[in-house]
Every structure is written in C-alpha cells, then in structure tokens.
Amino acid sequence: MNMLDKNTLDSLTAWLLARQTELFAEIGSRQNPVDAMTSADMGEVNDLEDQASKRERTTMQDAEVQRDSNELADVRAALGRLNDGSFGTCIDCGQPIDLQRLVAMPAAARCMICQTHFEARAIPPSLTTRP
C-alpha cells in the first residue's frame, strides 16, 4: 500500500463511502423517475414533438445512469483496493499514486503517467491522425 497516513486514508475512505451512497441514490432515482406524468405519457396525446421530447429525456437519463454506473464501479473498486491493501498503488506499474491525485480523485486506480497512456490507447487512431 502507498504510505498514506491514517487520517488521509480515513478521509478518503469516508469520501468514497459517501460517494457510493450518493451514486446508488442517483442511479435509483433515474431508473425510477418520479417526474409527473405528462399527457403523452398517459396516452392522451400522441404528438410527434412530445414523443421526440420524451425520447430525448430517456436518452439523457440513460446516459446519466451509465455515467453514474461507471463511476460507481470505480468507487467500489477503490473500496476493494482499500480492503486488500493496494489502495494508492497504480494498477499498471505498481508505483505509488501521488497524494494530490488521490485527494482530487480518490477512486484513481492509475498514476498520471499510466492514466495518460491508458487514455491514449482508448482514442481510435482515426481521431489522432490528420488527413
């Protein structure tokens, strides 16, 4: 484990647990929206504009749920690393992750160098070359 002091580890753990709770709540509220039903939702109006608006809202909600689900997976993985003693150590190179990075992003799994390489590999070559 990275040589983090107990107070820092306790603070990061508390943040991760709180964020996990927030994400569970956000995902749950988006999957079961409690918005007031519109007349289009009740089948009274079948207007194309209403349908398009509803599809757009659904698409946005789906994207938000996916984003939150991805972050939740990262938070849960960080909590797992806390439990197994590998928190604060880069999952790629095994070097310590800078404290500043962990404070800014407690769920960080990689040091900045490895994260930069990881993100560069995720970019399709067609987007990195100019015609």
Image (cartoon, grey):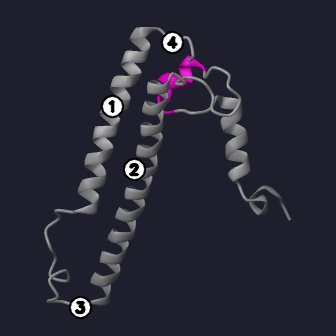
Q: Which residue is mark 3?
A: 46
Q: Nearer the viewer, residue 112 or 129?
A: 112
Q: Which residue is mark 4?
A: 4
Tell me if residue 104 is in the magenta stretch: yes
Residue 94 quadrant: top right
> Is 15 situated left or right of 87 in this image?
left
Task: Name the outermost residue toward the front.
Answer: 84
Task: Classify 90 as above or below 4.
Answer: below
Sooner in the amino-acid sequence: mark 3 or mark 2: 3
State whether the magenta stretch is mostly helix, strand or loop.
helix
Residues packed near mark 3 inside 10 Å, few (<14), some (14 to 19) or many (20 plus): few
Residue drawn at 83 percent across, 60 percent down: 130
Image quadrant for the N terminus? top right
Real-space Cα distance between discs 1 and 3? 44 Å
Secondary structure of the residue carrying tag 2 is helix
Name the front one of labels 4 and 3: 4
Tell me if residue 123 is in the magenta stretch: no
User: Residue 99: horizontal and vertical position, in percent?
Assistant: 55, 18
Sooner in the amino-acid sequence: mark 1 or mark 3: 1
Q: Nearer the viewer, residue 15 or 82?
A: 82
Magenta extent: 98-107
Dot 4 amino acid type? Leu
Sooner in the amino-acid sequence: mark 4 or mark 3: 4
Residue drawn at 25 percent across, 47 percent down: 25
Real-space Cα distance between discs 2 and 1? 15 Å
Residues packed near mark 1 inside 10 Å, few (<14), some (14 to 19) or many (20 plus): some
Task: Classify 76 as above or below 130.
Answer: above
Q: Which residue is mark 1?
A: 17
Residue drawn at 33 percent across, 31 percent down: 17
Task: Classify 88 as above or below 58.
Answer: above
Secondary structure of the residue carrying tag 3 is loop
